Structure formats: C-alpha cells, structure tokens
Amino acid sequence: MSALKYLAGYPVPVQDQVSAAISSKTLGHYLLSKYPDTHNIKSNKALYDYVMDMKNQHLRQSNTLSKVIYDDKLDVLHNALGLHSYVSRVQGGKLKAKNEMRIGTVFKSAPEAFLNMIVVHELAHLKEKDHNKSFYKLCTHIQPDYHQLEFDVRVYLTHLEIFGDLY
C-alpha cells in the first residue's frame, strides 16, 4: 500500500494497526493525544541555537556546524527529512570543509519531539556516517526514546500525506 510508504519496514501487524487508524480516521487523534503542541523554533537562527545547544550537550568533541537551516526543497530533492553534508571550498591555497545541516520545513510546524528526533539523527552523522548499529546506539544514547519517536514521525508523515496538516 503506497499510503504506508513511510512504514514499509515495519511488521505487518503494525502496518495493519496504522491502516485501521487511517480507515477510522483516528490517526490524528493518536498523534494529538501524544503530541498536543508544536514548538516555537521557526527561524533559522533559532534552529541553529537549538541544534548547537544539543550538540554542545551531547557531542562536544565532534566537528563544528557552520550552517543549520530549514530547507523547503529538501524532501523533494533529496528524499530526506534532514541532511547533514560536508561542503568543501578552496580559500586561497587551502581546502576548507564545512559541515552543514538542513532540516525539512515540515518540522517547522511539528511537535518539538519530532524536531528533536531529526536533529539527533543528523547530529549522530557527525560521528557515524552510515546507518549502522553504532549510529543507532549513539541516537538512543542522546535520546533514549529515539526509536519510538522515529516511528511516530513516520506515522505523522503518513497522516500529512493522507489527511494534510495536523496542527
């Protein structure tokens, strides 16, 4: 079922529960009961401060971030919700690399827990490039309920695709 593309990797019974919630139009109620409010982090400056606070708290020794922004083209161009990239530039005779983080604008009006999950995911890429066991161990170290939030973000994206905005 294409409506559950965000949940394709989950077991069939879980997908069936979500399908039942879609059919009965209770998916939004589930999300609103767990995440009733959105966050106030609307500007790129506020997002940068939010990300840097989290980075300094959990990954102090990792590389610095030169740019953190909301990107409205991200999900279309990269099929991603967040993107951590290295940008190399020649300055004089030296090659300088800068780390950038882009967060999909869909998270501007999402609950803070969802924004937090995406930020944790992208920050973990500072240490671990691939989605391997070490990567997810780092994610759960920073945010113990990471896996539940990742599932709920996928449910939220499914709701957005089928029913539109929740908030």
Image (cartoon, rainbow, N blue to C red):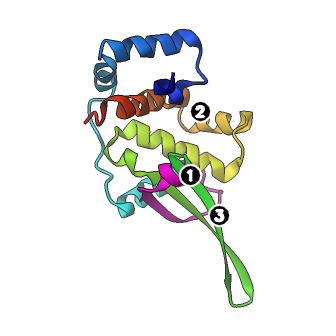
Q: Which residue is mark 3?
A: 86
Residue contact at pointers 3 and 2, CB within 8 angstroms = no
Please give the name of the residue rendered at 67% of the width and 34% of the height, measured from the top-left corner: 137
- Which tag, 2 or 1, sits closer to the chain's start? 1
**Helix, strand or loop under label 3:** strand
Relative vertical location of residue 162 with respect to residue 67 in this rendering, above or below: above
How far from the left and from the top, in percent, is residue 24?
A: 31, 12
Q: Which mark is residue 5?
A: none
Q: How far apart are the two marked residues, 3 and 2, measured between alpha carbons?
A: 24 Å
Residue contact at pointers 2 and 1, CB within 8 angstroms = no
- Which tag, 3 or 2, sits closer to the chain's start? 3
How far from the left and from the top, in percent, is residue 133?
A: 73, 33
Please give the name of the residue rendered at 47% of the width and 52% of the height, measured from the top-left corner: 103
Q: Which residues are magenta?
A: 55-78
Residue 5 is at least partly visible in this image:
yes
How far from the left and from the top, in percent, is residue 32?
A: 28, 26
Amino acid found under the numbered disc labelled 1: His
**Helix, strand or loop under label 2:** helix
Please give the name of the residue rendered at 28% of the width and 33% of the height, measured from the top-left corner: 166
Examine the structure image and report whether residue 77 is included in the region drawn in magenta: yes
Q: Nearer the viewer, mark 3 or mark 2?
A: 3
Q: Quadrant of residue 142?
A: top right
Q: How far apart are the two marked residues, 3 and 1, measured between alpha carbons?
A: 15 Å
Q: Which mark is residue 78?
A: 1
- Which tag, 3 or 1, sits closer to the chain's start? 1
Residue contact at pointers 3 and 1, CB within 8 angstroms = no
Closer to us: 125 or 59? 125
Q: How far apart are the two marked residues, 2 and 1, measured between alpha carbons?
A: 25 Å
Q: Nearer the viewer, mark 2 or mark 1?
A: 1
Amino acid found under the numbered disc labelled 3: Tyr
